[in-house]
Amino acid sequence: MANSLLPPEERNLTPDQVEALDKRRDLGHTFLVMAGQFSVIAVVLLLWVGQDLTYSPGWAHPMAYYFILALCLIAGFGLTGLILRRGTPRLD
């Protein structure tokens, strides 16, 4: 009998499909970890962004650009990780 706690599309998977599902979820977890690491980097960059925007002349704001890049990476890795991790998690 199929496990009724699983979503309907995951109830009758073959062993190969289960392995592919686990690999997908592992990759999603990796992306979520990378998003967390870039979040720490973004917090450190935030310490310099205000000073960079205040005192740097013209369009020369490297810390602000790095901060924006870090935010984009956080959003990209975070959303991709959440999409790949969808479904019921394993109980390891």
Image (cartoon, rainbow, N blue to C red):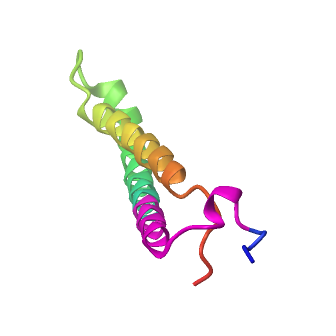
Relative to 14, is 50 on the left or the right?
A: left
Most foreground residue, 22 or 9: 9
Q: Residue at x 40, y 62 (%)?
A: 27
Give the farthest residue toward the right.
4
Residue 16 in magenta?
yes
Relative to 53, is 79 on the left or the right?
A: right
Most foreground residue, 12 or 49: 12
Q: Quadrant of the C terminus?
A: bottom right
Q: Residue at x 49, y 70 (%)?
A: 18
Relative to 71, is 66 on the left or the right?
A: left
On the image, the x and y values in percent for residue 66 come to 29, 38
Q: Is residue 40 above or below residue 19?
A: above
On the image, the x and y values in percent for residue 62 come to 24, 33
On the image, the x and y values in percent for residue 48 come to 36, 42
Q: Is residue 3 above or below residue 57?
A: below
Q: Is residue 50 above or below residue 87?
A: above
Most foreground residue, 57 or 26: 26
> In the rendered structure, which segment of residues is drawn in magenta?
6-28
Most foreground residue, 52 or 81: 81
Q: Main secondary structure of the magenta part?
A: helix
Q: Is residue 17 above or below residue 51?
A: below
Q: Residue at x 53, y 58 (%)?
A: 85
Q: Residue at x 61, y 69 (%)?
A: 89
Give the farthest residue toward the bottom.
92
